[in-house]
Amino acid sequence: MSVRPSARWTAVVALVAVAGIAVVLPRLASAGVEPGSAGVDTSLPLTDSKVVVSGRDRFSSLRITVNQTRNLVNQALSVTWTGGTPTTDYGGGTGTIGEHFLQMFQCWGDDDGTHPDNPGPPPEQCQQGATNGVFGGSATGQRFQGNTLTRVVSQKGSPGYDPSLGAEDEFGGVSRAFRAVDGTVVPQWRDTSFNPQASGGSYWLNPFFNIVTTNEIPGAVTSARGTGAELFEATTGLESTGLGCGQRVQPVAGGGTRIPRCWLVVVPRGDHTAENEGANVSPLFGVATSPLSPRAWANRIAVPLEFNPVETSCPLSAQQRRIVGSELLAAAVASWQPALCAKPGLSPYAYGSISDSRARAQLVSGTPGAPGMAVVSRPLDGATVDPREPVVYAPLTVSGTVIGFNLERLPRVIFPAGQQPSAEVLAQERALSGIRVAQLNLTPRLVAKLLTQSYRTQVEIAASNPGYAWASANPQQVGVDEDFLRFNPELRLLRTDSKNMGGFVAPSPGSDAAKALWEWVLADPEARQWLAGAPDPWGMRVNPYFTTSAAQNPQGAAFGDPVPDTYPKSDPYCYQGPPVGSLKVVPPPLCGLDWLPYAGSLRDAARAARAATDGARTEVNQSAASSDQVYKRDQPQALGQRAILAVTDTPSAAQYGLQTARLSRAGDDGEERRFIAADEAGLAAGARSLVERGVPGFLEPDPAHAPEGAYPLTAITYAAVQPTRLDDPGRVEYAAFVDYAAGEGQVRGFDYGKLPAGYEPLAAPLRAQAVGAAQRIRTLKAAEEVVDAAPPGPGSPAPRRGDAGPRGARGGLAADQAQPSAAPGPSIATPQPAPSETPVNTVLAGVTPAYRLAASRFALPFLVVITVLAALGALEVTKRPRRRIIEPADRDAERVAP
Amino acid sequence: MIRPLRAGAAAAMAALALGLVAAPAGAESYQRISGEGSSWSAGAIEAMRVNVKQFGITVDYNPSGSTAGRKNFLNGTVDFAASDIPFQFKPEDGSAPENPQPGSYAYMPITAGGTSFMYNLKINGQRVTNLRLSGLNVAKIFTGTITSWDDPAIAADNPGLALPKRKVVPVVRSDGSGSSAQFTRWMIAQHPSVWNEYCQRSGRAPKCGDTSFYPTVPGMIGQSGDLGVAGYVAQSFAEGAIGYVNYSYSLGARFPVAKVLNKAGYYTEPTPDNVAVSLLQAKINEDQSSSEYLTQRLDGVYNDTDKRSYQLSSYSYLILPTKVQGQFNEQKGKTMGAFSYYAMCQAQEQSASLGYSPMPINLVKASFDQIRKIPGVVAQNIDVSSCKNPTFSTDGTNTLAKNAPMPQECDKQGPAQCATGTGGVKGQTTATKAAGGAASAGSGGPGTGRAGAAQTANTGSGPSAATGTGAAGGAAACDPESGTCEAAAALTTDGAAGASSASSGDAVLPPAALVGASGWSDDQWLIVLVAGFFLGLLVAPGVVWRQLSKRVPR
């Protein structure tokens, strides 16, 4: 019952988990169809501050694990559980959640003493109730009943009516107030009498959180085997002002403030008779009461969350140093900015995400006000650069383009002839339903299929078949494509019949990253042949609008020449629906873009996949009065049935908790392919696989010759600067940015200033190159330029490759790459053990439970601290004169800034 | 005694390690705010939103369209809205009136830009990048009366182009949009008979006023948001399509925009410079007691006779909350104020990079006054000149407008037609008839000279001179803001795997050599690490002592 993660509980969890793997998921020797073999654990790794806590009374078998509870910043936490009752009334097609689920939210405050064995905050101090905070209904795709998502804890006229619980609205609903950390009390969370036709007023009344900003999880699903997993976004006071976690904002008696205690509260919900007792709810309903109602709250499980102090914000200043370029750097810049702007003598940096090609053009534009630094993953064309104003490149980050997915297991019911699995396998699969798939394997040809509107779901818009002859043998979507199933055999057991499994949510703007993705596809013989018009072994053909054969392409030109740097949707088919409603309104045509719209950015694509909504408007509104009203925005996919793919990048996928597909190399077309994940090893090897393609010191992908183990879509972003165009402060500040990026900015971590999840730190030679470039940016002045602009001779000192020899030495590289991939490759024939074993092993190995730390644990931090101190010391010693130079400007800035 | 000391030292070290030392002790705290609205200005707002995060200011923005933004502001489910047009008290298109409570909001112009006509058109497989259209032809295209690109009326605008017999596909906004409202308002003002006839034909009559919901007829394509319209026009199947989007989206899509004939007889596009010139003629409502204070009347812009003027230039607005009610309180007002100051001052420097035009000084000053109306704002007395706004000058004139380049003479209405590209493909020239199409439309390799030189050659003399030198008809990606170009080796490289992208090899200019970046191996790094370690041992105690002694007294 205790929150303290006793050894007993960790052992229990370990045993349960081991049992789960050993007993529930035995290897099926023959079938190749193994429920769970694609991974069932999508949670984040356990840390030494993980907490395991159990439920009470009728939830006493519930064991909840939170992977990290201390040193928190704004980050994702994994909440996993076992011993729950399987959720009911979902999966039947409606997606409505009925009974047996968990509700989670973040709260602040001291223990209210109600459960001595599980201290926790009072219900008024929880950030809950905002997910149906849009006037006119819920917009989240969460399908719950009654007051399940609200703070209405009692209803007038019901047997359990208790007006003392809060403020009563005119319809007799009694709302639990929200008490913010600063003491403000918001008695009513929404205005039930709000009339948008009348002037004034607001529907949503709580200033501290709303549907956009809340981090509550309104309902988490427990699988048939009693387990579940969710990502919870822990928020500091910057994101959730009403809670103030990590901020010194809680007033204390006698004056002053302190950092509040914060909590993750889980309210387990059971069956409707128990949950709805006293609430006057029809027995036909599932759970229909608020988690803050006394009955539900009695079961609440609290886990303390300790945040790092939030003190990073800098004062606004009128000065800023502008950088434009690739979105691949955006997440890193967002993390670095608050640390950089706290450094004395530097202006804040402003970053504008624009396409690489525009960034290149702006850098050399020479117009007044043009940004002095562009961030790109391909170099500038030499023809555009004035030889007197050479470009200095500095590597900044390593990340990758990924296929992110959000795929929840929905067991298949009907199987193709001859493919009916055994009853045992079916039962195992059913036990996993609702759990997210952890791994997918994709080849260049499969990605090509998904990019080219070739699956039938992409051209059969609103189920109307345009009658394409070429598509007659094509599968509906990737989940029923033999070409896919042979590398993802377990997916034979799952239903994935969503249009979002036939194509990607992809970003609209062009980018070097998109071009690299196409280059990888086009470098693969199998994919290239298929794009040229040859069917795959199962008869699937490319949509002719994407064929690289000019003769077959209805547009009369070959696709892929030049290599696109966007994700086009070239098929012109539009569906014309019949007149709608009594007014016989003729709907507008529905085209490929309406069917599966673009996302505005890589981050938006990840967000769309996480929320399982692509933003399409295809739902018919029968009461439309004009054609523009016919199609409404689609509801998000139903919980437990999500199936959506997106093109995004590693930091965005990490931020939104997406799983990412493993990819095979271009040219690796045998049966036993090796699939490479966009993880630390894959990205590190990927970065090493990049080569110079014309510009010394600038590494670019060479997909046709990528070594084993290298993630194919790895990208390095480079800062490009023309120092001779800059004034002294400009040189100093851009150099400082590069120095930071190459130093502190490469240290992994959630804290501001660190390298966010999804990036792989630069290898030492690249960091050295960046430091050298920074020095050059600082010192390259007009006087030197004529000498420097001369093209380097053969003996140029410029680095040629991340760590290996020159470009040609592929043999050397292969040897080099063998190291990280020494383990037998996870080819499809010998699937790796499910990753769920990893945390289990950790636990069995006896990681010391939280709160008891061995002294030796300080060794590493101590070393790190010493190193950091050394750096600080060096700064302290060396920067004095420099600081003196720039201080006057800085002072001016401060004077000007009010 | 030893224990607390050790703990203290550890804490100090931890603080040092976390870099907290440099953080100011009394950093401001800001309550999170959220907004919704215009997709036209979304590019500018997104950049502001992202860059204020470093100051501890958290802002959410959902670019769901001006209409949705105003609606949800009124519902009170967002704190602020962004809209290209004011509240619609008496909508003329039959939609429900919007009734904000007097005194509960204020308009603040946040960015300027042009509503551009992005198109997808080819002649013999070569992309047309220099299309010109008179206002009347624009109106006729978007009302379905010009249906083919070889219409004589379009030919009259484009003496240098032999436009194909291809269907014109107008692409309009399907969601409630401020762009649609601005565009229809312009049509009503400038070409009323065309609009009124269309209004009848499309079944919208008698509600024929300006509208956020563009009426459509068969043959038109509706798309949601600027992103949707630009995304549609950019598809290869969409040859013949033309849609209205904010200029920044055509830059993002790297597609051309039509130059529109202005009242001085020149065809222009909405570069940030031209927009700045045009908006000198915007009539701003300066009646502080008006419910529409600071909103724009654009007839002067439509009829501007400056050669550089672009008719469909306009401002986009933030709708600021000025009353504590619902979910909006004074703490949020503090955030709203700080964000607004940033938007009006620092962020304007970034505008042109993103395809927008910065605000002129009079509107920045007026906005500073609007910001003071936000409850809870920490009012600032910003010296306007400290904002690095490219429009500002010491003498009160609009620097950006003053220095805006004049159009080329070949942009003048008449027999000559510039070959230079527009929008997102500024350096990509188009063969013109006068220049002898075949010769200059060469599909040859990428330009090898400095593209800037080609640009210079283009200006001045007639169309034939324009394509004769430099770019040689090669595709080049150019900076839409400045007109300088990047020869597009990348665009024309063939897809052969592993091919070097330097197909323009003769012109590749290696960047400055990087000094000291080569020859490092792990050994050297180890040495550095060890050296660093010992240096740390030497320096650390002193530094710790310094920092501790700095901190302890507080």
Image: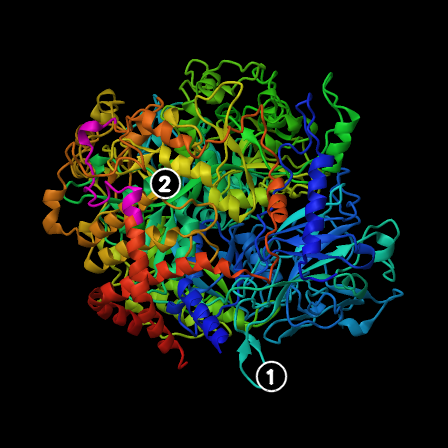
Between B503 and B119, the residue placed more toward the observer is B503
Left or right? Give the position of A447 relative to A885.
right
Q: Are marks 1 and 2 on the same chain?
A: yes
For the residue carrying disc 2, how many other residues have a C-alpha within 10 Å: few (<14), some (14-19), or many (20+)? many
Between A8 and B477, the residue placed more toward the observer is A8
**Residue B248 x/y as whole percent:** 39, 46
**Residue A630 x/y as whole percent:** 64, 40
Check residue A253 in the rendering and tell me which mark sits there, or answer none: 1
The image shows residue A249, relative to residue B214, as above or below, that is below
Q: Amino acid at mark 1?
A: Ala
User: Colour scheme in the image?
Assistant: rainbow
Which image quarter holds the C terminus of chain B? bottom left
- Furthest toward the bottom, the residue is A254
Q: Which residue is at a point 38% across and 27% down the rendered structure image?
A: A563
- Chain to which the residue tagged by mark 1 belongs: A
The image shows residue A578, relative to residue A750, as above or below, that is above
The image shows residue A431, relative to residue A318, as above or below, that is above
- Chain to which the residue tagged by mark 2 belongs: A
Visible in this render: residue A565? no
Q: Which residues are magenta?
A: B503-526
The image shows residue A608, relative to residue A493, as above or below, that is below
**Residue A765 x/y as whole percent:** 30, 43
Q: CA distance from mark 1 to mark 2?
A: 53 Å
Q: Which residue is at a point 33% across and 66% down the rendered structure image?
A: B540
| Quadrant in the rendering for residue A122 | bottom right
Earlier-in-chain disc, 1 versus 2: 1
Check residue B281 in the rendering and tell me which mark sits there, or answer none: none
SS label for mark 1: loop
Between A170 and B142, the residue placed more toward the observer is A170
Task: Provide the residue designation for mark 2.
Answer: A716
Left or right? Give the position of B144 relative to A738.
right
Prevailing SS of the magenta stretch: loop
